[in-house]
Image (tube, grey):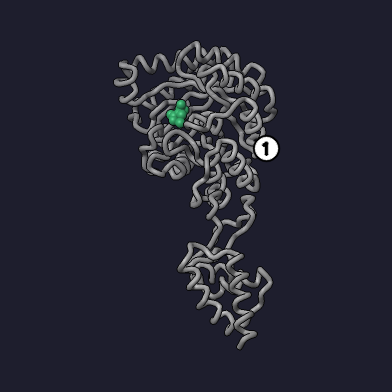
């Protein structure tokens, strides 16, 4: 089995989201939780971006023991020096530097040429090597960069000393087979690719970030950049919990991570609270509805054998458990199950009568909750006494 390195960028790409900014104390606490979760690399911030972020990266570098601590830079010498200074106390520092390689970046943003950008990429990697052995290079917008030019850049930066090469689909543009082909192209056409780890960094603009990252590792990448709850610029980044659970569930992929799956739900809640960023209820793995069943057909199957409607055991990802939610689409077995949980035992005939009344209540409100069930049972008991 091959290990997939988990590079967490919750505190950098995730924290860039408006409203999600964290202070140093909060970032340090979150970094410690990420280390306990088992991530391999923590991207702690972008040190030159503000004095606050510099201080956060320095503080994280001081407390993290096992994980690599990484700081982001542009391909600017001063950025790299400032990142190196922020990381100076880290046991395992990594400088993450890079530049845009697509025509959008080269022509519109930099008003430059492919050759000039390649030179700058090499220069910044060489400069970063003066401060750290572990240097990651990102080719921003690699998703929309032609494969031939991308391969030239990647070969040159590896020659200059890059130990990880990050292939970001910055705008979330690629389809999974295209992203996989891009990684395969690099594996097959970059002569020194065996000297670096290929990393996937996918954005979720088309809802494909996780699928693209999985396509990337199948094609030969061995690091995935992701965030808790998939938070990040615009539609977000690849979600850490999705990647970790997919790798765990699909043993045939022959990959593993060091992520402790039972910590996924607690850390999702923790980051959501800390950043005041709610998780959508239908979010895979960690959403409030990820293990709840509300339609009669599903509930009946689930109550006979949970695996009928759940491919993941909620306990495996640290969730409290599955739930049977009662709505106007629910059936008799779900009603009987919930009543029994509250201590009411009824035979089939009782349930038939109770169900008629239940559906009336359920039609009038969105969900039937425990208090409604107590009322229903009381009402039924009174009717039975009168009869
Ligand atoms: O999406 C992106 O391209 C990035 C890089 C800065 C790594 O976040
Ligand atoms: Zn990004």
Total numbered labels: 1
Question: Is 99 placed above or below 324 here?
Answer: above
Residue 310 shows up from this direction: yes
Left or right of 149: which side holds 130? right
Question: Is 33 placed above or below 371 here?
Answer: above
Please give the name of the residue rendered at 45% of the width and 39% of the height, measured from the top-left corner: 216
Q: Position of residue 27 (x, y in %)?
A: 61, 29
Please give the name of the residue rendered at 46% of the width and 67% of the height, measured from the top-left corner: 364
Which quadrant holds the C terminus? bottom right
Please give the name of the residue rendered at 68% of the width and 72% of the height, measured from the top-left corner: 343
- Judged from this view, the residue extending furthest toward the front is 386
Read off the residue under disc 1: 36
Question: Is 135 placed above or below 183 here?
Answer: above
Q: Are there few (<14), some (14-19), or many (20+) residues within 10 Å of tag 1? A: some
Q: Position of residue 270 (x, y in %)?
A: 62, 40
Left or right of 49: which side holds 91? right
Residue 135 shows up from this direction: no
* Mark 1: secondary structure: helix
Of residues 307 and 215, the one nearer the viewer is: 307
Left or right of 210: which side holds 11? right
């Amino acid at each position: 089995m091959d290990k997939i390195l988990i590079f967490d960028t919750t505190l950098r790409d995730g924290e860039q989201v408006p409203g999600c900014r964290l202070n140093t104390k909060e970032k340090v606490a979150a970094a410690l939780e990420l280390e306990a979760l088992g991530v391999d690399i923590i991207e702690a911030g972008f040190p030159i971006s503000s004095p606050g972020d510099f201080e956060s990266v320095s503080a994280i570098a001081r407390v993290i023991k096992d994980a690599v601590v990484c700081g982001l830079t542009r391909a600017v010498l001063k950025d790299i020096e400032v990142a190196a200074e922020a990381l100076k106390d880290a046991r395992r520092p990594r400088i993450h530097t890079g530049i845009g390689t697509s025509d959008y970046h080269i022509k519109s943003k930099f008003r430059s040429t492919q050759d000039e950008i390649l030179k700058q990429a090499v220069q910044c990697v060489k400069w970063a090597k003066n401060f750290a052995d572990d240097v990651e290079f990102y080719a921003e917008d690699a998703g929309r960069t032609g494969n031939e030019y991308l391969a030239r850049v990647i070969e040159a930066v590896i020659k200059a000393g890059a130990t990880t090469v990050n292939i970001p689909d910055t705008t979330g543009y690629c389809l999974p087979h295209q992203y996989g082909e891009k990684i395969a192209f690099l594996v097959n056409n970059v002569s020194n690719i065996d000297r670096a780890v290929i990393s996937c960094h996918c954005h979720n603009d088309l809802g494909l970030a996780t699928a693209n990252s999985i396509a990337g590792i199948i094609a030969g990448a061995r690091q995935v950049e992701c965030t808790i709850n998939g938070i990040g610029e615009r539609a977000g980044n690849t979600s850490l919990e999705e990647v970790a659970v997919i790798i765990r569930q699909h043993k045939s992929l022959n990959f593993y991570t060091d992520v402790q799956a039972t910590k996924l739900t607690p850390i999702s809640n923790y980051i959501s609270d800390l950043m005041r960023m709610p998780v959508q209820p239908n979010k895979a793995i960690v959403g409030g509805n990820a293990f709840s069943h509300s339609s009669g057909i599903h509930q009946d199957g689930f109550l006979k054998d949970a695996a009928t409607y759940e491919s993941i055991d909620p306990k495996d990802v640290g969730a409290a458990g599955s739930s049977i939610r009662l709505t106007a689409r629910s059936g008799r077995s779900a009603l009987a199950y919930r009543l029994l949980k509250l201590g009411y035992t009824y035979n089939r005939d009782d349930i038939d009568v109770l169900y008629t009344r239940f559906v009336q209540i359920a039609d009038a409100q969105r969900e039937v909750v425990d208090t409604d069930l107590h009322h229903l049972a009381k009402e039924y008991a009174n009717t039975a006494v009168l009869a």
